Structure formats: structure tokens, C-alpha cells
Image: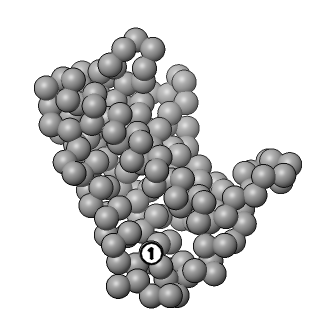
Amino acid sequence: MPSVENPFQGQILEGWQVYQDHLVAAISPLTAEQLAFRLAPNLRSIMVVAAHIVAARVWWLRLVMQEGSPEIEPLVTWDDEGEPARSAAELAAGLEQTWKMIESGLQRWTAVDMQQVFYRPGSDKTRPFTRQWIIWHVLEHDLHHGGEVSFALGAQGLAGIDL
């Protein structure tokens, strides 16, 4: 049961961990052709969507909240136009590396920590983001884009993310 000190221990952390594991399991066996699949020409490929999940985690946790190590910062560009294609192994490793930042924070942040305010790097500091908002946003982002991946896998006759 989560404590008052750390409301994220318990079911929230465990549930997100399960989803993370399912996401990695869905991405890991994919071939380059399967990763390149797009549901429509105007939609992103599975590879780009997975890279976007990784990049968003790095953006919010590392660049905005200064969690984790600076060595992870190059992953923030993985979803940029012109970036090289990533293999399933690279994407799985990126998901695992970024998960460690999330998990580490969720294990240590207190209810008071969740109210800390952050601003986007280089911003005019007119729009504050609490840690709580950032964590919820990263979680909903994972779920939303994981759904895109799952739908694209199903369209190829492959198993989607197991919920």
C-alpha cells in the first residue's frame, strides 16, 4: 500500500511497470520492415512512435526535471526528422533506460516533491508544470502512443500490447 510520504509506491508503480514490460515485449521481436509499418502514409511508423515515447520521457524527466544522467540526453532527438532508423533492440534499450529514470523517481518522490514546479528549458517561465502534472503526462503519453503501436501491430496480424 502506498504511504502518505510516497503515493506512487504500490499499484501505480507496479501497473506502469507491467505496461512498460508489455511495451518492450511488443517492440523487441520486430523486424525492420515491421517497425517501418505505417497505418497510413500520413501517420508515423511504429519505429517513430516508439522513438517518440523514448524522446518524450527524456525531454520531461531529464531535460525538464533533471532526473537521470546527462548520458541519456541524446535520446531526446530520436523522433526528430532525419534521425536514423532505430532497430527493435535499440528501441527496447531506450525504453529500458528511460524507464529506469521513471522508476527511480517514483520510488523516491514524496507527496511534497510532487508539487515542485518546473519550466521548459529556454522558456519564458510563464507556464509552470508540477512534477505531478509531468508524471501524469508521461504516463498518459506512454499509454496513448503505446495504443498506436498496438493498433499498428494488429493491422499487420501481429500481437498487440498485452493488457
Q: Which residue is nearer to you in this view: 54 or 152?
A: 152
Q: Tell me which residue sits at (19%, 48%) in the image.
A: 162
Colour mapping: one colour
- Residue at image location 42% in from the left, 48% down from the top: 142
Residue 160 spot, x, y in % from top left: 20, 38
Residue 75 visible in this rendered orientation of the protein: no
State the image coordinates of residue 72 (x, y, percent, origin top left).
Answer: 51, 54
For image coordinates 59% across by 58% down, the residue present is: 134
Name which quarter of the figure residue 90 lies in. Answer: top left
Other residues around mark 1 within 10 Å, as few (<14) / some (14–19) / many (≥20): many
Secondary structure of the residue carrying numbered label 1: loop
Say which amino acid is labelled 1.
Answer: Phe
Using residue 62 as the reference point, say whether residue 8 is left or right of it. Answer: left
Residue with the mark numbered 1: 8
Whole-percent x and y of residue 23?
A: 28, 48
Say above or below: 135 vs 82.
below
What is the quadrant of the N terminus in the image? bottom left
* Picture layout, residue 92 above or below residue 69: above
